[in-house]
Image (tube, rainbow, N blue to C red):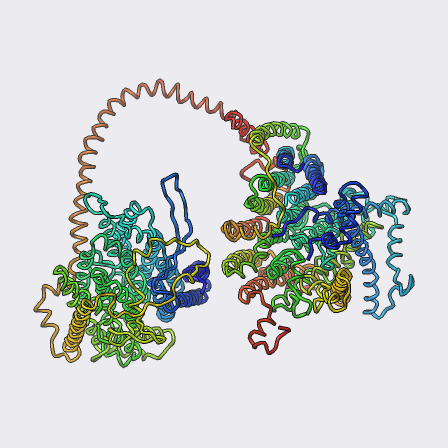
Amino acid sequence: MISLSSYLFISFTLFVAGIAVMIARKNIIAMMLGIELILNSAALNFAAYTRFINNNLEGHLMSLFIIVIAAAEAAVGLAIVIRFFQIKETIHIDDAAQLQS
Amino acid sequence: MTSYTLDVYMPVIILMALAVGLVVVSVFVAQILRPFKPNALKEQAYECGEDPVGTAWSNFNVRFYVVSLIFIVFDVEGALMFPVAAIFRKFVAIGEGAVLVGSLLVFISVLVFGIIYCWSKGDLDWVRSFQLSEDQVNQLKGSEEKA
Amino acid sequence: MEYTISTIAPIVLLPFFAFVINAFIVKRFTTLAVIISCASIVGSFFYAARVFFDFLNVFSADYYIHKTFTWFDLSYGSFPFKMDMGIYIDNMTATMLFMVTGVASLIHIFSTYYMHDDKRYGRFFVYLSLFTSAMLALVLSENLISVFIFWELMGFCSYSLIGFYYEKEGAGNASMKAFMTTRVGDVFFLLGILAIWSVVGSVSFVDIYQAIGMGKFNGLYALGIPLATFAGFSVFMGTIGKSAQFPLQVWLPDAMFGPTPCSALIHAATMVAAGVYLSLRCYPLMEAGHLTTFIAYIGGITAFGAATIALVQTDIKAVLAYSTISQLGYMVLGVGVGSYNAAFMHLITHAVFKACLFLSAGSVIHSLHDHHTHAHVQEMPRMGGLKSKMPYTFLAMLFCTLAIAGIPFFSGFVSKDRILGDALLMALDNKVYWVPAVLGFGGALLTAFYMFRMMFLTFFGEPRDKELFDHTKKETLSWNRNLPLLILSLFTLGAFYSGSLTGQGFIKVAGEKYEWFQTLIEKPNLLKFNNKESQAFGFASNPSSETFQKSKYDSNHGLSAEKAHHVHHVHHIGALISIVIAFSGVFIAAMMYFWRSWNPGFWVSLFSRWYRALQNKYYFDDLYIKGFIQKGLLPLNNFLAFVDMGIYDRYAVDGWEKVNRVMFTMAKWFDNIIVDTVAVDGTGASVRFFNVILRTIQSGKIQFYFIMIILVLTGYIWTLNI
Amino acid sequence: MSLSINDYLNQFEAHQKAISFISELLGFDASGLITFLVFATAAFVVVNVMALIGGLGTYAERKISADIQLRQGPNRVGPYGLLQFLADGVKMIMKEDIFPAQADRTLFNLAPLLALIGVFATLAVLPFSSGLTLTNLNIGVFYLIGVSSLVGVAVFLGGYSANSKWSMLGGMRGASQIISYEVPVTITILSIVLMSGGLSFGSFVESQGGFPHQWFIFHNPFTFIGFFVFFIGMLAETNRAPFDLPEAESELVSGYHTEYTGMRFGLFALAEYIEVFVLCGVAAAAFLGGYKVPFDLGNGVVFVEKLGLPAIIGKNIGQVLQLGSFLTKTLFLYYVVIWVRWTFPRIRVDQVMTICWKYLTPIALFNLVGITLWVFAFDGQSIWEVLSHMGGGAHGGGH
Amino acid sequence: MFENTLFFLSAALCIIGAAGVVFSKNLMHACVLLLASLFGVAGLYAVIGADFLAASQLVIYAGGVVILMLFAVMLTGGSSENSNKFGIEKIPGMGSTKTYVFAGFSVLVISFTILKLMANFMKSYTKGELPAFSSTVEKIGTLLVTDHVLAFEISSILLLGALVGAAVIARPRKG
């Protein structure tokens, strides 16, 4: 029951949900939730392959670094969002369509 | 390396279930026992007796964010250092401790650099102190003299 | 005794980390940076001392540590392309480490005195740290590629240090000259490495020794030259460049533009020593390439020629610079005459006394301050009688001068005498070697003469510049000025190196007759390397499998009794000759400059043409500038310019112009009518048309981009059918 | 140190026999069922004891504060007022549950649940004794840090969902205070991990001894400082005085649970009291030798050899002693926490952040470096061992 | 038996959470649902013996990232659906029917692509014997300081960069 395919299915679901969130939402923070989902699906895949394919712990390490990078990404991304909000008083993604203020 | 089965996680699940159960049961019991007479005044948010003005969900100071930002960086660095710390004694025992000390110290020093930066830029001050310009000081003095 | 990477790596990494840290903090925390630099090199010295004393006392004579890790591995099938990096420590490396860290520590300490008032005080230490760590890494290197890397790094550092006073006129040129001149040697060195790679398939020293031992070089020719000769020659060209040997010696005197402590570091302990160290490391290659005669000639010519130039110099640092070239010539001569042990010993002894000489010179220069030009005085004609003003510096410098002049009981005598003795032995054996031997003995005479000339001119007699003399403060004993000098001058005593005062015997250590230099340093025994596997990096080596017995001192050096007697006999004769020569050099110097019985001007007028030649350094700079550059390169440039301007430009380009003019008139019509109206305006119109369409795509709406990415990715995957 | 309470029981013959008997009775392999039952029972017992301790905590708090302030304290319900907490509980259940009209009802309901889940899940790894540890996860302390951070989310959501300005301020303050103080606490725990060489509480406790000089708090000077860093951070993480800014009644009415009434408020309070106990237990396990009993009485071998008791009884007496040792230390710390609350005045919000980022975190980092170098230099020996080696064994503790 | 229970609980939590993130109309609720989903992922890690990963997931996500998200939501004006500052009503921030149609279309396309890739892979996959669980902390630690020490140190630099960059960007400015 607990097999590679079930794990792949779950991570597939997470990935698809992330994509859906990123396209459907117009709120930047909500889109970042989608990014977290996508990164988690990738990390889960690495851990699952480690368990079911080669039992090599470097997959775990990869997942760990994905988590680390996700944290850094969230920190910087949200800081940009907040700065954006301070300038434009909105976090609607369509208001961020210009390269120049 | 001793192997284990997934049974070790059973208490975790049971405890979480107990927590949920406790909440559900207590709220349910209270539902039966307690009185239920709502009125508009009761349901008002408490604002020292006045009528509440606007919503509480407005934007807050950025300082909260900077604090949580520093926190998350430390959190992640802690998470990376835990496995290294766990093998430290073993490496010291086989005489390779210097490598670990070196890499840990480099890691920690980078961490310290970050906190020093935030400190020097005043991100750690809850109340940011700023220097009054001379005009402002004079203005203040003037107002004091008038008073 | 467990040797792990953590006991050896700090030797290199401490100065390197000091460099990295100081590079960031030097501007704001200068004092802290200096302290970090000094502390790191002293710490490195203690680590090196541990290695050295283990090699001296614990390990057997032929024990070595060889650890590698794979740097990159691009092997494909049967084609090997794998590069290892690692460390190789044998007795020679251990001795070098001890010497380099020790001398560098003392130079660091002295620099806190010498450079203290300099405006780039901190930066100097940054360079020093990097320089020292590069030298230490070179010494520890396991293969030629990593030697080359650190060799170039040192080249860069010497470039920075020579040009340290870049606002001074000539300093920039001098640093450029040093950099470019050594580059000539480096090109050859790289060629040599490639040649070795092509034969051995690896550049590790151990593999090279093994290959030579197995005779892999035999019967391989390139352009009619044996490959071993070519490879050895090319590597030796690297030595010539770095150690300032005969054709490429011109950069070293100019390198005196740098601060004096850095001269001490570059020209005594580290960089120039690296060249000789390399040729000692590659000695089996030189032997296999039958290059020893050539090397001996180069060494002899350098030793004698540089000594003659040093006779007429008036700048105190220039005298020392030429004496450095000359002494390096002795080392190379030692390599050439097969005196492996003595050449290395001279490298060590020379490093100590030359560092001390430079530091003493620095001490003298630093205290002589001209109040008119606000510059330090380096000219010997303005000195004199300084003995009373700076007694401790004088003491230190006297010891070193005695050492370099080859007076018995001092270290210079011990090592130089062995080289000369071996040269004499070779000359008796083979007539070809007479020239280097005689040049070597002549150089020894000149060395004694010019060094004592320097001493007498500087410290004895009446002060020739009274005002300068009166302004000079009397020297007081201070820890960072005199302590390094006195420590170094203590180590000029021969007993530290030879085991006996005369330099010919042995002493008893722990109840055994034991002579450390003779026992420790020997030519690489090629057969030993045949079945050795290198150890993986990072794990403790297992010295318990080695024998821990020190080989006993063998007064016959492994020769048969009859031959050994002959050798000893020749050595005794050589020692006698050198003693006589050294004392006569001192005597001549004293007659000329101390008692003033002989007038040097007479000799100058007698050999006036030679004197001019010497003052112009045998016209080498002129030769290179006028001969090579002006006669060779400039005409070539002119010729190329002529070809370019006169032929190519005139006929090809201008001719085409004519053709083009005709074509142009035809084309103009075509252009106006067809291209401009139809194509260009048409293109513009179409661009405008597509612009309208494409503008909608680049909307700045991120989600639209996502959808596009997904569609393109999908299309890609489905079309390629991955 | 067994992996869990189930493993501990499995080593007794009677338990094995019971399993096989039940298997025969039921006709299938009942070991899984028994495991579940054992865990469920133990967890249930632990949770109930914790709820009792939480309830008695409120009583103790009021009694001790009364003592400190020369008052009587509760003395009407039951002997010495001991049953006061039951009366409070009944009162809370009987109170009307009011939802603010503008509240986010889902999150308003969810917040106490999250707090309770976070706190209860930490109980799983608390080492009451070498046998009575629900599960000795090999990532124990790291798991505990992760799960207990749910409380921060719960505080924030509790403050957010009520849509009251007092609540919101309290929630933001509470969450940022909790996460801030997690940094020095994590770093201090990291240094303990360095010394014990494992992440599980079992390895923490097993690398200490029964006597005070074998505890990590007296292991070297850095850990001594580290204990206080941990203790202060712990006070702040549980929003205890003097760090009870989030619920400072003089500024914020009642902080993030201003709008909570009745049982929901009770659940928050319960979670808070249990969390104090849990963190006191962590402090005891990490610094004060945990369940270790002097003279190795804890493993029960002495009783078997000297008194001739059967092995099973000797072992269980040892367990009881260990449990006693652990509870003594934890409850002592609990007492200190209450004592601190009624001794020190509350500090300002900017001082809270200053203490965390400018004092505790640098000190904790310094401790970490110091302990790293200590372990490296002295090969993990404590200061007493080092001193006794230096003094030729003439003095120093116990070696 | 218990393995399957744990797996199903975690998977359900994970997928329901993810679905909630997609369909929730309230940003705060979406954040809490994301927390649930990440908890589920932590449980899934635990099921395949990645104990350290599970705990780091809890520590970093539950303790760090989600709190950061919640703070960011509060700092940008709560979960109320903003119109922009000119007062013009646009598409609501949490999506509209049109955006969901686009999303559904993209999801459909990407699902087919991923399933095609996965099918190729699963054809060649044979299930092998699974080893017993053992603690991964020591192994991860050893890997971090031996083979991957560079990544270990560089991640500290990465985090330093993130800290400095984000602090500079988000720092409150006067005026």
Choose top left, top right, bottom left or bottom right for residue C76.
top left
Picture layout, residue C78 above or below residue C574: above
Quadrant in which residue C20 is drawn:
bottom left
Numbered-mark total: 0
Q: Position of residue D352 (x, y in %)?
A: 68, 60
Q: Relative to D287, is B114 above or below?
A: above
Seen in the picture, residue C228 relative to D359 is either above or below; the reply is above
Side (left or right) of C4 relative to D157: left
- Does residue C464 appear to the left or right of D342 in the view shown? left
Q: Is residue D35 visible?
A: yes
Residue D296 falls in image quadrant: bottom right
Residue D3 is situated, as x and y percent measured from the top left of the image, at: 69, 53
Most extreme residue toward the left is: C606
What is the residue that sits farthest to the bottom in this orientation? C388
Quadrant location of the N terminus of chain C in the rendered image: bottom left
Return the x and y of residue C143 as percentages of the image width and height.
35, 53
Q: Is residue C441 above or below residue C462?
A: above
Residue D244 in sight in this render:
no
The front one of D369 and C606 is: D369
Nearer the observer, D230 or E135: E135
Residue D132 horizontal/vertical position (percent): 74, 57
- D191 and C691: which one is in front? D191
